[in-house]
Image (spheres, rainbow, N blue to C red):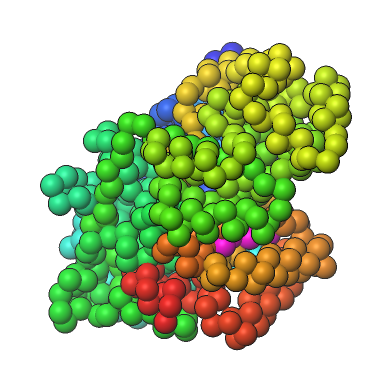
Amino acid sequence: MERQITQLKVERELIKKEETVISEEARRISSQCRHYAMCKIDFLRTGLCPAGEENHFVSYYPQGRMDIYHALANNRIPVTERLVDIADTCTLCGVCDKQCYFVTELRPMKVMAALKDYVEAHVRAGKEVVRPESDRTLARMREVVGEKWATNDPAILVSYSHDPGVFTGVQTPRYVIMPGKREEVSQIVKICNRHHLPFAVRGNGSSVMGFVFAKDGLVMDMGRMKRITLDKSNWYASVEAGVAAFELQKEVAKHGLRVNVAEPSALVCANLMCSGIFSTFSASYGTAANNYINAEFVGLDGEVFHLNQREAPNLFAFHKEELPLPGVCTRADVKVHPTTEDEDGILVPFSGFHDAVAFSRELGRRRIGLAVAVLGGEYMSTFMSPTEALGDSVKSTFKEDLGIEYAVLVIGDRYALQAVRSMTDVVIDGELLKIFTLGLPRMAEGEWKDLVRGLEGSRAPYKILMKPEMYPLLEAVLKPSPELLAQAVEPDLRDFFMELFSRHEMSNLVWLNMFRIISSRMGRRKHAVAFIVYVPLDDIDLAADINDEFKRIGDSHGVSHDYGFITPLDFGKRAVFEYDYYVDHTDPLDVQRMQQAIDSTARMIEGFSQIDRRVKWIRYVLYQGFARMENLLYM
Ligand code: SF4
């Protein structure tokens, strides 16, 4: 990796041009940014982008730089003062290449270098560097947050103007502002009201459904409000609006605690507000209001309220309708939970949907396990494969070679895991998962194929092959090692990935789940559009019918799709069900297909919810995530 960075720097010196030239390769890469914001959290222990960490606006992070380059390449923005600073502050350190490659297999460094080249050549040639004029509204906002943290510079605005969502389009705001504390949020909301300026509140990535844009208005990026205060004796962490799930989990884990959070780069307060937090741990920690103790808001009038005030708006209620934003959540007191040192994770394989879901319901009923989820075989192999090509070559391994279509993930202490083992014939434990993960490349080879072919018969091969006495044979055939798996990635990244794959956490189901890394590669091939539906679990046929309908609609519209997960809630009475569609957001035809598929799917879910009112989907939970779980699931 170091060699590659040096090489890149030398090449840049040699090709310094007087003309500003757009690199087609960099343009193509920049168009593919999914806005998942994994470059804004330190999930690989590489450290963060230094420029982003210091300057906070997304435009200084790799994600924003990708948008900027794409906009420059399409003549959507001029070279501005801020853009010169953005290009200048990139040190070409290479951190973003490791992070982004892990998740999407993209190489943003090529874009970073091209951006620097372009801007340097522009400045060297003496071309105009635009300095946007201020106005009275901006001047007033700067008085509140400070000169640096309120701007109308197009290089900042462009990173807040679009997402890969298929209905969004470009919606450029007039201003972007980064408040540092609640009082500033309050004053900014009042200024917006006075000037009739629409505003949107923005988290780390983007909502991917167009909810964080304010065309001609103001976007409030909460990324500077990052304080976490732990109150151990009262079992909660006070979290400001800019804290990401990964950051909070990392902080409380230092104290042997855990929080129930969503995707690692998602902001905790934003998740609580928008959808309520659901995860595999919702099997025991619940969802919606179960996850917090209190929350602080700046209301739409700019005044502050707390949920525990009698006169506060009733955010505990749930109504099946689309409601407006109730205010800006500036702080939440999030529940923390104890952990034990004997926690571990296992997967229970199944060849059919019905049996897997019934098993997860049984675990819910009996209160076994902290995290429970029915995962699809492809979901697992997507995470285990560091590249799409390897994923494709071993795609059939779980389903066709081993006969596994679904696996029930269980995280629990040793008593819970003993109980699970006593309820089934075979499990994939940590040791076996490591053998499969680090030996994955050999699953495309002849020796493995011969082994599974030899097991063909009446029983599913996994029932024989996954018994502990078979582990030595599996090791002999797959010869698992970090070196082997690292061979799958691009040569200059192999040293880094070899070290990464040798870390315990990379095959540890507890860590992978509580930090939500296991789903991070879902959008590697294309941008993922997730459908979340709450379903009753006493009628598994209903969940199976919904699953079949997702599949049918995906197929009929020609969009890629895959089952996501099902997690039992509230003693197995209900479940949260995710199904995912995938779109190449840069391909207009694919976008059109996805729009039609979403439309059909919306009608399908509404149809099911009219037949059985216990079926509810996330559409109506928007801005109602603080509701009582009971109101959400049962009213
Ligand atoms: S190469 Fe540039 S953009 Fe990427 S992480 Fe380093 S400083 Fe940030």
Q: Residue at x 38, y 77 (%)?
A: 631
Asked whether, in this view, residue 535 is left or right of residue 635, the answer is right
The furthest residue to the front: 422
Q: Position of residue 447 (x, y in %)?
A: 83, 19
Q: Position of residue 17 (x, y in %)?
A: 65, 29
Residue 177 vs 13, above or below: the answer is below
Nearer the observer, 212 or 274: 274
Residue 82 vs 628, above or below: the answer is above
Dominant SS type (magenta): strand
Q: Residue at x 13, y 47 (%)?
A: 233
Q: Position of residue 115 (x, y in %)?
A: 57, 37
Res 342 → quadrant: top left
Q: Position of residue 291 (x, y in %)?
A: 32, 59
Q: Is 580 included in the stretch rendered in magenta?
A: yes
Nearer the observer, 189 or 129: 189
Q: Residue at x 77, y 60 (%)?
A: 559
Query: Quadrant where the N terminus lies?
Result: top right
Res 383 → quadrant: top right
Asked whether, in this view, residue 195 is left or right of residue 602, the answer is left
Residue 430 vs 312, above or below: the answer is above
Query: Quadrant where the C terminus lies?
Result: bottom left
The furthest residue to the left: 233
Residue 111 vs 233, above or below: the answer is above
Q: Is 614 included in the stretch rendered in magenta?
A: no
Magenta extent: 577-581
The image shows a total of numbered marks equal to 0
Nearer the observer, 536 or 258: 536
